[in-house]
Amino acid sequence: MEQKKDGKRGLGALSLQVLRTFMTVAETGSFSNAAKQLEIAQPTVSFQIARVEEMLGATLFHRRPKPELTAVGRDVYTRVRLILSRVNELEASLDQFKQLELGQIRIGISAPRCALSLIGMFMRDHPGVDVHTIAGNSDDLLRLLEQNRIDIAIAGLPHGVTDFNCRLIEAIHLCAWLPAGDALAGRSAIDLETVAALPLVMREQGSITRRIFESACAEKGLTPDIRLTIHSRESVREAVAAGVGAGIVFNSEANFDSRVSFIPIEPQIAAGTYLIYPETLCDLPAVRAFVDLVERKQPAAPSLLTAPQTVRPEPVGDSVV
């Protein structure tokens, strides 16, 4: 407690309960009525008021014939009323946050199809919560979690991480993206050796798609023919559609586009889409609600987040990539 040079305690020693006691006495005009309203003993009310007066070095109430505010008491009453009104507003606001009538959640996204499906459900359940999203590759999002710049990440990973809470949402695997007219586009599957020999358009370093693909190639002693590195899967798709080369994408991300076709790489090169969040944020109402949503939906994840159907045209001419 702050101590003044004259030996009296500063106003920092006043608790909200003491301020409420002062307000109640002033408004009821009675120590006994205030005690009944506050559900405390009358001697406690008398003691608290005496302590306030001692701290202030001024009399707040004329005691007889009944408690009546002094000039100083009236000034203090006005100020305390303002303080308590702000406190009441804060308490009401906190209750709204707890009930998710208000709030904010920051979500990092590297798997937009999966993430936006879940975000859409969350927003319908909690329309008062502001949802802010940040897009990036998986490495970027893990760094943002470490820096406390996002609350949750929904990202592709080769396996769960140990630094954060990590829950598998869906199993995914790598596919090759090819121009729709390519001779290889009619296949039901393609092997890694064939893919590695094609001119390739790849995501940037730090992309889990690229990391898993290059790791699989290294295990087989293959050196992929990467012709162009480009940021974002949308840019990779445009490059593939333009005939620059073949692309690598997870099956969960290969949305239908008549200009391109995607083919599973066999044997499967597996990974997962994960919900990732720090343990320290588990008690935040919005984070807890989002985690609960994923936990409720997880048993239905394969049907909720099914991979898009592959549309493969008949082979036309020679391979163009």
Image (cartoon, rainbow, N blue to C red):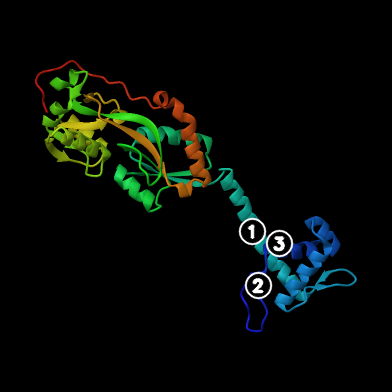
| Place of residue 286 in the rendered image (x, y in percent of width and height, measured from the top left) | 51, 43
Q: Quadrant of residue 303?
A: top left
Looking at marks 1 and 2 on the same chain, the residue that comes earlier in the sequence is marked by: 2
Residue 116 drawn above or below residue 17 = above
Position of 113 with respect to 233 (left or right) is right
Residue at left offset 42%, top offset 27%: 301
Give the structural element (helix, strand or loop) at label 2.
helix
CA–CA distance in space, label 1 to label 2: 16 Å
Q: Which residue is mark 1?
A: 87
Position of 96 with respect to 176 (left or right) is right
Amino acid type, callout 2: Leu
Mark 3 and mark 1 residues within 8 Å of each other at the beta carbon: no
Residue at left offset 42%, top offset 44%: 277
Looking at marks 2 and 3 on the same chain, the residue that comes earlier in the sequence is marked by: 2
Residue 19 drawn above or below residue 147 = below
Q: Quadrant of the N terminus?
A: bottom right
Amino acid type, callout 3: Gln
Q: Residues within 10 Å of mark 2 (few under 14, many from 20)?
A: some
| Place of residue 230 in the rendered image (x, y in percent of width and height, measured from the top left) | 20, 41
**Residue 52 badge:** none
Q: How many marks?
A: 3
Q: Which residue is mark 3?
A: 17
Give the structural element (helix, strand or loop) at label 1.
helix
Amino acid type, callout 1: Val
Position of 241 with respect to 167 (left or right) is left
Looking at marks 3 and 1 on the same chain, the residue that comes earlier in the sequence is marked by: 3
Residue at left offset 31%, top offset 38%: 157
Q: Which residue is mark 2?
A: 11
CA–CA distance in space, label 2 to label 3: 13 Å
Residue 213 drawn above or below residue 263 = below
Q: Is residue 198 visible?
A: no
